[in-house]
Image (cartoon, rainbow, N blue to C red):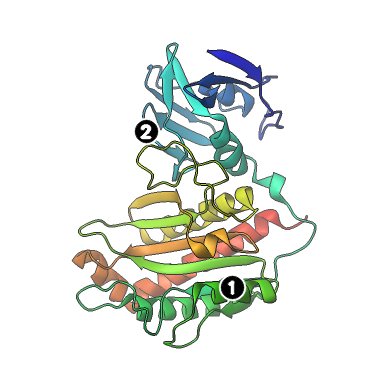
Amino acid sequence: MGSSVAVLLFASVAPAQSTTLKTYRIGGVDYVSVRDVAAHYGLGRDVRSVVDRAEYKTSFAQLEMQADRRDILLNGVNHWISTPILVARGHLWIAELDVQKTLDPILRPERLRLGGSIHTIVIDPGHGGSDRGTRGRSGREKVLTLDLAKRVERHLTGNGTKVLLTRTSDKTVELDDRVELARKKGADLFVSLHFNSGGPADGIETYCSPPAGASSTASPSGRGGEAMPNNRFDEENVWLAHCMQKALLQATGAVDRGVRRARFYVLRYASCPAILVEAGFLSNPAEERRILRTDYRESVAKAIADGVLAYKKSVEAR
């Protein structure tokens, strides 16, 4: 197991021990000791005290993980990381890439503060026209996403934000036209809205693009990222996704299926931070019944707006 000093000399979110994080090459992946990560970010001690699990909780942060799993609990939201947590030499290790591209943006969002303000949000109702999307027993995705988008628009414009919809009626809009609208209008954020399908599964997922070299959540091995184009907002993407998923969970009480990574076209080619929300499963009869209720969709829409506004507030210059 070789070691080298990592380029992870970050300032901490709270007073912490003076640490230099080192990477260790294991099986072709650069890992960082979870104990070193906890010390670096001032997360306190591991309350689990077992080899294959770790749990850190302070007044400002929460981190839980388990060996051989790619889902971690980070500040109240499940996040899917690129590489499974490793157990070796009697303790846990996390991939360096996951520290840089998931943990750090969530634990230090103040690092993302911009020189200006976020003015224009593109809301993208998925599907439409000949592209009908999924459907449940009664609900049709293309109809429900448009309804949801218009509700989100109303909440955001009521807060003084400029909102553009990629479609305002039941028409077909190509994927490249959706991202081109955001580029032409100089959008600051892009949020795509969808409903899911997957048998009896239930819950809410928020997607952002994996960073270069990282695998998608759907990749069974969790090793090796696809050599595909990607937008350049890795840290902003995951922080926006975190804000969105947290707001949706708080508003709905839905199952947390996590912040996930996928190279969807509208995420890869976005000219600004971009996420895609799967706001529930139409294939699950019980969840479909909730989604078909206008009061529930109104709650979801307000939560989406709240997620955008939480991100906006956190990154705008003070």
Q: Residue at x 44, y 87 (%)?
A: 171
Residue 22 in percent (x, y) is at 63, 20
| Viewer-proximal residue among 306 and 20 | 20
Residue 227 in view here? yes
Residue 304 in percent (x, y) is at 49, 66
Q: Is residue 312 above or below residue 47?
A: below
Amino acid on which disc 1 is placed: Val
Q: Residues within 10 Å of mark 2 (few under 14, many from 20)?
A: some
Nearer-N-terminus badge (1/2):
2
Q: Is residue 171 above or below residue 79?
A: below
| Viewer-proximal residue among 22 and 285 | 22
Q: Residue at x 50, y 83 (%)?
A: 167
Q: Is residue 49 above or below residue 237?
A: above
Quick one: which residue is furthest to the right in this view?
115
**Based on the displayed image, in which of its 4 quarters is residue 6 positioned?**
top right
Residue 59 in view here? no
Return the mark for residue 204.
Answer: none
Residue labelled with disc 1: 122
Residue labelled with disc 2: 69
Q: Residue at x 45, y 56 (%)?
A: 206
Quick one: which residue is furthest to the front in this view?
227
Disc 2 secondary structure class: loop
